[in-house]
Image (cartoon, rainbow, N blue to C red):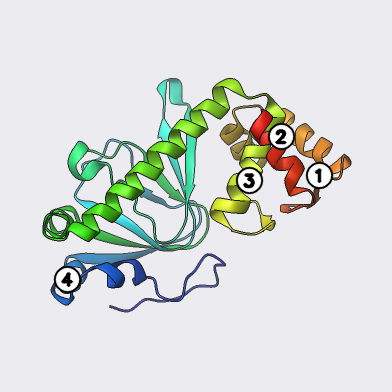
Amino acid sequence: MEIQHTNSDTIIDNPLLFFEQILSADEMSLLISSSNRVDYTRKDIIIKQNTRVSHIPFILSGLVKVTREMRKGKTIILRIEKPQTFLGLTSVYGSETYEYSAVAIEPSSILFIDSQALKKIIEGNGVFAFELIQRLSQRSLFNTSRLTSLLYKQLPGRVADIILYFSEDIFESQTFHFPLTRQELAELAGTTKESFIRTLSEFKNDRIIEMEKNQLTISSMNIIKTLSRLG
């Protein structure tokens, strides 16, 4: 299977490393023979909410935003996904349709794995199944944390959460580029675009962060974590 690298900063050396560490040679052969890779450009839709599940996408490279369409045409951003992550994993056994949409926010390569083949591998490989359970558990904990943040934290705490999310979970660096627009970041923080920008400016004026266009550097990680913790 040919993997074509792009210039994305979110590419890893071996896009299939997760599978190769856990699956047998026969399982890898089944995985590859029942999968196809698709390359996407920014803003391309990868999966669409409420469409029938036939394949489970796995991110080889790039970044993807996961969104859910609500009533009255409103869409909310649930999270950002990076390489070595499944999309729609909860739909393998829990639903016949995708529960959300996924959109590329930078050039991305996606491996589409036939859902029946994935089920066969899960049922025959306990280590692989355990790894997926761990990932689903982590996703559940993340969703609980996100909901708690949106419902109970004040705006500085929610913005601090967003900064920590990109710094620690997505880019693993105290300096990074926001891959979303200010409007999208505001939606993640559960506020308006104007309020989000104002709070970032206050953080900058207080020398908690440094900002140059979309690049952010955390100057005081202790303060960001304190804001996040106190809410």
Amino acid marked by disc 4: Ser
Label pair 3/1, CB-CB below 8 angstroms: no
- Give coordinates of residue 220: x percent, y percent: 78, 48
Residue drawn at x 63%, y 24% as measured from the top left: 153
The mark nearer the N terminus, 3 or 4, is: 4
Q: Which mark is residue 4?
A: none
Residue at disc 4, secondary structure = helix
Q: CA distance from mark 3 to mark 4?
A: 39 Å
Foreground mark, 1 or 2, reads 2
Q: The disc labelled 3 sits on which kind of residue?
A: Leu
Give the CA separation, mark 3 to mark 2. 11 Å
Seen at 23% across and 60% down, the residue is 127
Give how far apart the Cα atoms at labels 2 and 4 are.
49 Å
Instruction: Pick the residue in front: 45 or 60.
Output: 60
Q: Give coordinates of residue 105: x percent, y percent.
A: 52, 53
Q: Looking at the image, is mark 3 or mark 1 earlier in the sequence?
A: 3
Q: Answer with mark 1 or mark 4, whichever residue precedes in sequence.
A: 4
Disc 2 target residue: 227
Three-letter amino acid code of the residue under disc 2: Leu
Q: Is residue 177 visible?
A: yes
Distance between the Cα atoms at labels 3 and 1? 13 Å
**Label 1 crowd (10 A; few <14 / some 14-19 / many >=20):** some
Q: Position of residue 81 (x, y in %)?
A: 46, 51
- Determine the CA span between mark 1 and mark 4: 50 Å
Proximity of marks 2 and 4: CB atoms separated by less than 8 Å: no
Quadrant (top left, top right, bottom left, bottom right) of the C terminus: top right
For label 4, the residue is 33
- Which mark sits nearer the N-terminus, 1 or 2? 1
